[in-house]
Amino acid sequence: EPPKREDERALVVENMYRHAKSATTGDNSLQAAICATAMVAEEQADDHLVFLLSDANLGRYNIAPSQISAALTSDPSVTGHAIFVAEPSAADWLAAEMPAGRGFAAMEASSLVSTLKQAFEAAVVE
């Protein structure tokens, strides 16, 4: 069941951030976007949303922003957004390479909740 209170939602984001920091070397952002989009599209729902969090080190693994964008927009029933957590120049550049309103940058964990809220609001508007 999804968290209902703001403190419960903040804990989810904090756990996601903590997990991302301790993940092994390598980037699974592209594969995660592909899998999440396909899995969400199969579910019965009023809205199909995917929020990808990535450390923005895609270039190190030869992953172009266009590949992430293609994965998140591969199913028209799914609205996909990417949130890049990294140093400002990389995160901002990657967010700018996404379709309008689909890419976001968060420089530190404390801004993730507000960035997710911004991404969710953008998804609801579409």
Image (tube, helix red, strand yellow):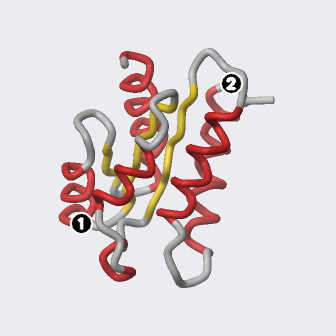
For the C terminus, give its image quadrant: top left
The percent position of residue 25, horizontal first and vertical second, equals 54, 84
> What crowding class fits label 1: few (fewer than 14 Cα within 10 Å), some (14-19), or many (20 or more)?
some
Q: Residue furthest right?
A: 1
Q: Which residue is mark 2?
A: 5
x then y, percent, for residue 42: 69, 34
Looking at the image, which residue is at 72% across and 22% down?
A: 44
Q: Which residue is drawn at the image coordinates 26% and 47% (left, top)?
A: 98
Residue 77 % position (x, y): 51, 27
Residue 27 in picture, x, y percent from top left: 49, 74
Q: Quadrant of the N terminus?
A: top right
Q: Amino acid at mark 2?
A: Arg
Under circle 1, the secondary element is helix
Q: How many marks?
A: 2
Q: Is residue 58 left or right of residue 30?
A: left
Q: Residue under label 1, please give it.
A: 90
The residue located at (56%, 44%) in the rendering is: 37
Task: Return the residue nearer the eye: 32 or 118.
Answer: 32
Q: From the viewer's perspective, is residue 45 above or below residue 70?
A: above
Secondary structure of the residue carrying numbered label 2: loop
Query: Within the image, what quadrant is residue 94 found in?
Result: bottom left
- Asked whether, in this view, residue 91 is left or right of residue 48, the answer is left
Task: Name the residue: 25% across, 40% down.
Answer: 99
| Kind of residue indicated by mark 1 | Ala
17 to the left or right of 74:
right
Residue 38 in the image: above or below residue 45: below
What separation in Å lies between label 1 and label 2 (alpha carbons)? 32 Å
Name the image quarter holding residue 41.
Answer: top right
N-terminal of the two: label 1 or label 2? Answer: 2
Q: Nearer the viewer, mark 1 or mark 2?
A: 1
Instruction: Determine which quarter of the picture holds residue 48.
Output: top right
